[in-house]
Image (cartoon, rainbow, N blue to C red):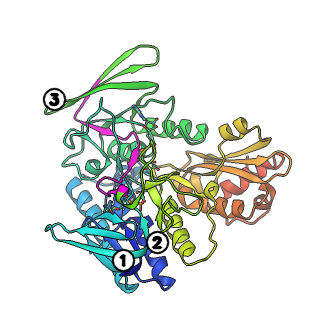
Amino acid sequence: MDFDVIVIGSGPGGYIAAIRCAQLGMKTAIIEKYSALGGTCLNVGCIPSKALLDSSEHYYNAAHSFAQHGIAIKDMQLDFGQMIKRKEEVVGQMTKGVEFLMNKNKITTYIGFGSFVDKNTVKVKSNDGQEQQISAKNIIIATGSKPSSFPSMPIDKKRVISSTEALKLPEVPKHLIVIGAGVIGAELGSVYARLGAKVSFVEFAASMIPTMDSTMGKELQKSMRKLGADFYFSHKVTSVENKGDSVVVRAENNKGGLLELEGDYCLVSVGRRPYTDGLELEKAGLKTDERGRIAVNDHLQTEVSNIYAIGDVIRGAMLAHKAEEEGVFVAETIAGQHPHINYLLIPGVVYTWPEVAAVGYTEEELKTNGTPYKAGTFPFKALGRARASMDTDGLVKVLAHAETDEILGVHMIGARVADMIAEAVVAMEFRAAAEDVGIMSHAHPTYTEAFKEACLAATGNRALNI
Ligand code: FAD
Ligand code: NAI
């Protein structure tokens, strides 16, 4: 065998798996079909979207709230080209960083398309058509996902776009129609709403971010409305038509009412599908399930015991940090260790402003499971820190077991909650009671006081500042 481990795909799942394998003394190779390493997350996902979210937020604040802070700007202009250029620079720094990490850990990198020859052998076809075969005792599939769509909304990458094109548009749309008000829709919709686009959401479900706790969707919608966004919930899209300079979206609501919207771009953000195209799984004795995912057991092992799969290509949340945890998990499993992942405690974050962050059970799940619970909430507007920064939108909701007081779920919307949710993860990992957090000192004035106060609210209505 040429290697102990071959990793196919260099996203956050694959490159982290490769590093951990190398750290554990395994001779490791990684295969990536694109010349830039880092996968969806670094190239067309987490990092570029956050770069544009940050830039557009600066622009929006400069235009709308600096004056209240006593900062007057004359003749402010948007240089959208520079915004996109800065985003590309950030991506370039990050992908070069992964290259550096591969070299530092003595991981052999193959740029080319990987496909199975048999259960131990992978063929790598480079862009210039050259082919070579490499073999390993273990193979980790980390080939990620691609945007999905429906026949009624074919993505043409010009007027009807996926998140990938939305990250590099040649102009700010005048009217962006977003199909799907989930995570991508909310994030990229807010980028363009902040830059002055009219944004209309057409969503199948009855609210934004429908898989999160329902309070979060309602609160997020309120803040998106302040950006001028329109919402068409409970609508099924029937057709999307590129008319050259514009795009027409037609939909029907659940009462039979018809909707027709005309915009200059339509972002299709209705979810992503696992990506296994061209992998020739069958040559290794593998197949995908009905949803295109690679089936794995609790050890993330496929039905062929030396082949593992991680990240977006398997079941579970399509999140970079979930893929990373699984990368480490598989490396340590191959090394004979007994790692553990607590999937309940993988947080979910939406990087709008205010941000949304959650961990554990939603209130709807607790009701469905019949778990006795109590809820404590605390609004950002009662926080000194939020008043000082004028970030008063949002709240923290803590769900605790009615009898034991153990924290079962934490749902936050507000300034910097993407960072604050880590405290909730730690508390829940150590199985803290709401009162435990409520009696711990939190620096004043900080946004984190909202979590402490919500925990006190859940502990017998003991919040102090409301
Ligand atoms: P990927 O990152 O998709 O990487 C797979 C890699 O495998 C790719 O580079 C691909 O080219 C390569 N590959 C595939 N097939 C082959 C082959 N046969 N041979 C060689 N190479 C191959 N998640 C978060 O946690 N936080 C966020 O803020 C966030 N923001 C996002 C924003 C957007 C716009 C999008 C689209 C996604 C976002 N995500 C975010 C999701 C996150 O990007 C994914 O969950 C994550 O990238 C999955 O990692 P992965 O390693 O499984 O796969
Ligand atoms: P999503 O699953 O978050 O949202 C898709 C939305 O589209 C849902 O609200 C769904 O009800 C709606 N929908 C589905 N079919 C529809 C139809 N026919 N018509 C109208 N609406 C329809 O998926 P999204 O936003 O595409 O993101 C894909 C993945 O990428 C997510 O799973 C997410 O985990 C990941 N991601 C994570 C981010 C983060 O962690 N901050 C940011 C962006 C993406």
Q: Secondary structure at mark 3?
A: loop
Q: Which residues are magenta?
A: 261-282
Q: Measured along the vertical axis of the image, is residue 35 above or below residue 159?
A: below
- Residue under label 3, please give it: 243
Identified at 85% across, 51% down, the residue is: 404
Earlier sequence position, callout 2 versus callout 1: 2
Q: Secondary structure at mark 2?
A: helix
- Residue under label 2, please give it: 17
In this orientation, which residue lies closer to the viewer: 285 or 301? 285
Residue 2: x, y in percent? 35, 81
In this orientation, which residue lies closer to the viewer: 392 or 141? 141
Counting the numbered discs, the total is 3
Mark 3 surroundings: few (<14), some (14-19) or many (≥20) residues within 10 A? few
Q: Is residue 241 left or right of residue 15?
A: left
Dividing the image into four quarters, tell me where ligand 2 lies: top left
Q: CA distance from mark 1 to mark 3?
A: 47 Å
Q: Is residue 127 left or right of residue 48?
A: left
Rendered-image quadrant of the N terminus: bottom left
Question: Residue extending furthest right?
Answer: 403
Name the front one of labels 3 and 2: 2
Identified by mark 2, the residue type is: Ala
Mark 1 surroundings: few (<14), some (14-19) or many (≥20) residues within 10 A? many
- Residue under label 1, please give it: 29
